[in-house]
């Protein structure tokens, strides 16, 4: 049985929409369904919509639902490692091998599900693997469904500190015709400071046929300045039109303010061109360039503590004074870098959390960018904007995408000293350059009082069937969450811009 009835909310937009838009929501995975109590507080909700189902990953668990009835595919969420358990060649990813940082993608060009994450060894000196599982069909209820599973050793590219392999953090996967591309942060295992970034390509061609995969192609950057441009986002295809011939997969990352006693602003974005070695012989290149963007201060940025991005207040007051705070994750661009080929041009969308408060206010809003090019190559900034329609609400943790008509939609978390963390979205036309119009998805009912971490990412994806309907997942609370009362929930929503016509 589904845990609760779906909720439909009618939203009225500005005149260019001409009619109402409906947001339909239903319950995703919640804390009570997690199979490992140790990680119940670490949510990281994400998911993707396919041709027949929506699949969600929350920390270590997977669940999927029929797109029409919202009935779950499995009676209860399954341990993510289950996908790798039936293949004796991927033991390091099976069971509890994957303990977080997982993702669900839908490879629209192949109509397959792609689930990925990194393994965590039993000992600090053990081996880390990148795990990927690809379905044999687009239907998760098909009797002939198989999972083609692979594990790739990461240790040779991570480096070592004090006899321990560096830690692979925050992996992000993008689908592309010639490979699956992955970026991750390399962390010092002693102090968990940034030690580098790693970009890799996986052999999509052979993985899709369950054949022996060629060696993973990875390029590490460890020049001591990666704290300024960590957390890579690879391009991930939306729609069913492949990228232009010869178009490399582009990665992006924000460029943090240069660390001085007074500097709080940056005007730069990093673009990385992954030049894949066609022979898969280890000679791939990862070439960095930079683009100028409108000036921004990362969300919650403080010169005295630039790695601390915790400043979003909640209504609850701590013993001794002050509001409970949660993390804006304002130090990075957020998943996904959504790519679409419109024929006459190629478009990339990405977003992050920035400061919008004035004076001493740390209030945050959402910055978005569209990059374009008209031929194969590294794109340029085409347009950008900031979601900040009032002067009181903090907006943070965004995810963005666009439909086949060039309408953008972005979902994010909201809150302040009188508003429990909730979920909202905005949509607008990129081609007509209309003003984003905000709408409610869910009003939160409680504060998070047992951790400052409010997940690490969300996801906005577009239905591959009509190429119009946006699907979005985020987390929320119905009451205050404490150490003794871990009660987080996730909400999956879908909606479309009324002017978009099905493909």
Image: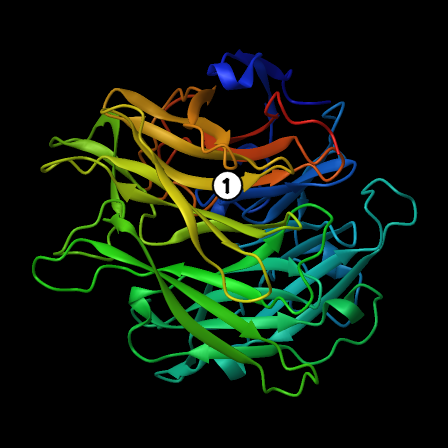
- Residue 51 located left or right of residue 304: right
Residue 261: name its quadrant: bottom left
- Give 269 or 199, whichever is nearer the viewer: 269
Q: Quadrant of residue 471?
A: top right
Q: Is residue 117 left or right of residue 252?
A: right
Residue at (29, 65) in percent of width and height: 228
What x and y, as percent, mark residue 369? 42, 47
Residue 232 visible from this viewpoint: no
Image-based side of 219 in relation to 208, left or right:
left
SS type, badge 1: strand
**For mark 1, what is the residue?**
400
In this picture, is 377 found above or below 413?
below
Q: Residue 292: tell me if it is visible.
A: yes
Residue 30 higher or lower than 17, as above or below: below
Residue at left 71%, top 72%? 203
Residue at image x 68%, y 83%? 280
- Counting from the top left corner in percent of width and height, residue 276 is at 61, 77
Residue 264 placement (x, y as % from top left): 16, 53
Residue 42 rendering spot, x and y as whole percentages? 45, 45
Q: Please, is residue 9 above or below residue 352 in the view?
A: above
Q: Quadrant of the C terminus?
A: top right
**Colour setup of the view:** rainbow
Q: Quadrant of the N terminus?
A: top right
Q: How many marks?
A: 1
């Amino acid at each position: 049985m589904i845990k609760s009835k779906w909720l439909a909310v009618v939203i009225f937009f500005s005149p260019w929409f001409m009619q109402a838009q409906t947001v339909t929501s239903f319950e995703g995975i919640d804390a009570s369904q997690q199979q490992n109590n140790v990680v119940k507080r670490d949510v990281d909700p994400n998911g993707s919509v396919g041709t027949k189902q929506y699949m969600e990953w929350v920390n270590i668990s997977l669940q999927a639902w029929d797109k029409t009835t919202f009935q779950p595919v499995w009676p209860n969420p399954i341990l993510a490692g289950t996908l790798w358990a039936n293949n004796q060649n991927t033991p390091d990813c099976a069971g509890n091998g994957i303990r977080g940082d997982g993702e669900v993608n839908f490879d629209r060009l192949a109509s397959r599900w792609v689930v990925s994450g990194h393994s965590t060894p039993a000992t600090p000196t053990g081996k880390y693997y990148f795990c990927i599982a690809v379905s044999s069909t687009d239907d998760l209820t098909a009797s002939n469904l198989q999972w083609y599973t692979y594990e790739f050793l990461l240790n040779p590219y991570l480096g070592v500190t004090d006899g321990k392999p560096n830690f692979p953090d925050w992996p992000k996967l993008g689908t592309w015709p010639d490979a699956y591309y992955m970026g991750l942060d390399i962390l010092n295992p002693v102090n968990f400071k940034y030690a580098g970034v790693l970009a890799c390509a996986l052999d999509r061609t052979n993985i899709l046929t369950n054949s022996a995969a060629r060696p993973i192609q990875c390029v590490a950057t460890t020049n001591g300045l990666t704290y300024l441009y960590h957390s890579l986002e690879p391009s991930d295809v939306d729609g069913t039109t492949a990228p232009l011939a010869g178009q490399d997969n582009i990665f992006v990352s924000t460029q943090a303010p240069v660390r001085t006693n007074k500097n709080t602003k940056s005007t730069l974005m990093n673009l990385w061109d992954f030049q894949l070695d066609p022979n898969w012989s280890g000679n791939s290149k990862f070439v960095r360039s930079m683009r100028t963007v409108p000036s921004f201060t990362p969300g919650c940025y403080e010169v005295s503590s630039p790695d601390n991005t915790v400043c979003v207040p909640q209504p609850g007051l701590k013993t001794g004074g002050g509001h409970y705070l949660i993390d804006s994750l304002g130090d990075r661009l957020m998943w996904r870098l959504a790519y679409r080929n419109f024929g006459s041009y190629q478009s990339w969308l990405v977003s992050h959390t920035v400061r919008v408060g004035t004076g001493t206010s740390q209030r945050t809003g959402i910055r978005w960018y569209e990059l374009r090019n008209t031929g194969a190559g590294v794109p340029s900034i085409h347009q950008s904007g900031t979601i900040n329609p009032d002067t009181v609400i903090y907006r943070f943790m965004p995810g963005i995408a666009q439909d086949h008509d060039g309408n953008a939609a972005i979902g994010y978390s909201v809150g302040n000293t009188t508003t429990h963390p909730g979920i909202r979205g905005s949509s607008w036309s990129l081609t007509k350059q209309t003003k984003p119009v905000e709408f409610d998805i869910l009003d939160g009912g409680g504060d998070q009082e047992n951790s400052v971490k409010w997940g690490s990412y969300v996801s906005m994806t577009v239905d591959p069937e009509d190429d119009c309907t946006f699907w979005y997942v985020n987390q929320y609370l119905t009451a205050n969450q404490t150490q003794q009362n871990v009660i987080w929930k996730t909400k999956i929503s879908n909606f479309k811009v009324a002017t978009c016509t099905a493909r």
